[in-house]
Image: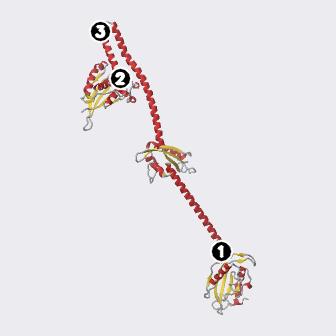
């Protein structure tokens, strides 16, 4: 049965076509580990080695002498047709020595004689050989690549599964990212609608990461960059920087949120109030420059301008209400003091008039009568002046005081009043100086202006026990084309005025007891200021303090 194989060329005698001495080609063929078939030119199986028979679970009688197209016909009709085409492809024409590797093919075989078909995959290599007699033989080396194909299929399935899982993860990630993006957009819309700024400060670098709303709250464009130094050195108003800095420092170390409000001034000079909440992130590390400080701070910012303005208005209203209440209480006390002062001031001249009138009735001495008349006249004049002041104060309070303007020489008027009061001043031991009285024409009500000068000089005499009273009038220059002003000054070397009451001495009923000034009705300076203002002028006082004397100035527009 091995006779056909005896004509096969041995590997060492391929060139001569003679077998090598002592070499049994059939035994070598039978012992090959690979599955081999040898076909003749008619595609009849000439030989099959043990490896092939074991591979296809067949015996030699069922294979040898039969056509390659007829053996192993166990697969389905489709598989048998595919096997026939596969063999046609490999067993075509060729030249001796040519080797062809066929493509893998599935061809199922039965498991035993009557067992079910088992999926199998095959691959064959065909070599065209020749014999010494010029015959054509085909060597067909068959490989069962089922395990390799299953491994490849398994690997493909695994790769497909991995690709599917990777794609699924990618899809899930894309969906999560899209959902996150939508949520972020919704959050940004909500923050913008609520005018809420969101920010994060990196404490190591001092850089802010924030939304556009936070920049808008600080008066910055969306493209602006915010740093910690810029926030405290430029954006926050100066008076609020220290408190915000303290809040930021507290947020770096504290676990609880920190809240602080501050004011910013936008480039258009508009002022806005911002409420800032800051906290260290949950789970954030404490790797700052200081032990325990957070590496970042996060927070929100709100525009509270309307609320803050309302609070400030309420605070201002409360302060104004408290001040008004204090002024009302003070006015009540001043009124009580005024009534007491009026009673006291009226009692003195009335008592003198009453006493001297009684003396006139009981005494016939002409000397006593003349003295009594003088005293009665002086006290009656004092009463008349007080009554006039009271009437004028009522007219000014109700806006009914009228003035009749006419050209008046302020210097001459002040000189006349000074001479009228000289004897009275010098009787008290005070020297009167009225040397610098420039001629200055003003439009004024002479009677009212006389009342102002008289009150100022009387006031100076009242508070001077010695020294001098200096009255002066001088013209002040003004811008080109304007008349300038006439300034009256009355200076005394008396008790002076404390700085804390210097402005209040012109208030109605005010008695500067704390400054050591003398008592009175508290109307003289208030009347003087009211009359001067009716003339379009101004009045003010100067004093270096208690015991340093005082100077009162009156400035009136000059008449051209």
Q: Which residue is mark 2?
A: 391
**What is the quadrant of the C terminus in the image?**
top left
Reply above or below: 249 against 381.
below
Q: Residue at x 34, y 9 (%)?
A: 359
**In front here: 124 or 133?**
124
Q: Earlier in the sequence, mark 3 or mark 2?
A: 3
CA distance separating discs 3 and 2: 36 Å
Q: Residue at x 35, y 13 (%)?
A: 353
CA distance separating discs 2 and 1: 127 Å
Crowd around label 2: few <14 · some 14–19 · many ≥20 (10 Å): few
Q: Is residue 190 left or right of residue 14?
A: left
Reply above or below: 339 against 268.
above
Crowd around label 3: few <14 · some 14–19 · many ≥20 (10 Å): few
Q: Earlier in the sequence, mark 2 or mark 1?
A: 1
Q: Is residue 558 left or right of residue 137?
A: left
Q: Earlier in the sequence, mark 3 or mark 1?
A: 1
In the picture, the disc for residue 149 is: 1
């Amino acid at each position: 049965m091995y006779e056909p194989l005896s004509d096969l060329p041995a590997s060492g005698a391929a060139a001569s076509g003679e077998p090598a001495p002592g070499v049994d080609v059939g035994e070598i063929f039978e012992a090959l580990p690979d599955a081999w078939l040898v076909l003749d030119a008619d595609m009849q199986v000439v030989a099959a080695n043990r490896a092939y028979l074991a591979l296809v679970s067949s015996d030699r009688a069922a294979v040898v002498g039969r056509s390659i197209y007829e053996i192993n016909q166990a697969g389905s009709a489709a598989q048998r047709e595919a096997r026939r085409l596969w063999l046609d492809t490999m067993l075509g024409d060729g030249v001796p020595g040519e080797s062809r590797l066929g493509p893998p093919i599935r061809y199922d075989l039965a498991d035993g004689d009557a067992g079910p078909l088992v999926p199998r995959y095959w691959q064959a290599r065909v070599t065209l050989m020749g014999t010494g007699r010029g015959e054509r033989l085909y060597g067909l080396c068959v490989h069962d690549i089922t395990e390799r194909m299953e491994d490849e299929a398994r690997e493909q399935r695994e790769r497909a599964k991995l690709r599917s899982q990777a794609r699924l993860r990618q899809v899930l990630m894309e969906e999560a990212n899209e959902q996150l993006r939508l949520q972020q957009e919704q959050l940004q819309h909500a923050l913008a609608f609520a005018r809420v700024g969101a920010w994060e400060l990196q404490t190591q670098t001092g850089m802010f990461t924030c939304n556009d709303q936070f920049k808008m709250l600080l008066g910055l464009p969306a493209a602006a960059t915010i740093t910690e130094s810029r926030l405290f050195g430029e954006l926050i108003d100066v008076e609020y920087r220290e408190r915000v800095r303290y809040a930021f420092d507290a947020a770096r170390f504290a676990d609880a949120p920190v809240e602080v409000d501050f004011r910013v001034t936008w480039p258009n000079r508009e002022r806005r109030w911002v409420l800032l909440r800051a906290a260290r992130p949950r789970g954030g590390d404490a790797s700052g420059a200081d032990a325990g400080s957070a590496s970042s701070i996060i927070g929100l910012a709100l525009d509270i301008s309307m609320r803050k303005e309302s609070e400030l208005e309420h605070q201002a209203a409360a302060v104004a209400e408290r001040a008004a209440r204090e002024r009302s209480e003070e006015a009540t006390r001043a009124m009580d003091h005024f009534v007491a002062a009026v009673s006291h001031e009226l009692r003195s001249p009335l008592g003198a008039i009453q006493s001297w009138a009684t003396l006139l009735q009981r005494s016939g001495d002409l000397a006593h009568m003349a003295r009594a008349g003088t005293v009665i006249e002086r006290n009656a004049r004092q009463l008349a002046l007080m009554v006039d002041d009271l009437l004028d104060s009522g007219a000014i309070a109700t806006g009914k005081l009228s003035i009749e303007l006419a050209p008046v020489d302020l210097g001459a008027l002040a000189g006349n009043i000074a001479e009228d009061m000289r004897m009275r001043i010098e009787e008290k031991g005070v020297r009167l100086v009225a040397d610098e009285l420039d001629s200055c024409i003003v439009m004024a009500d002479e009677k009212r202006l006389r009342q102002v000068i008289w009150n100022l000089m009387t006031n100076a005499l009242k508070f001077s026990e010695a020294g001098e009273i200096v009255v002066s009038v001088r013209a002040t220059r003004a811008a080109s084309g304007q008349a300038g002003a006439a300034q009256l000054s009355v200076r005394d070397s008396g008790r002076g005025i404390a700085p804390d009451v210097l402005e209040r001495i012109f208030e109605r009923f005010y008695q500067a007891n704390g400054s050591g000034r003398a008592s009175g009705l508290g109307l003289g300076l208030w009347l003087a200021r009211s009359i001067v203002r009716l003339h379009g002028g101004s009045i003010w006082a100067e004093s270096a303090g208690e015991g340093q004397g005082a100077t009162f100035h009156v400035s009136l527009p000059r008449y051209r």
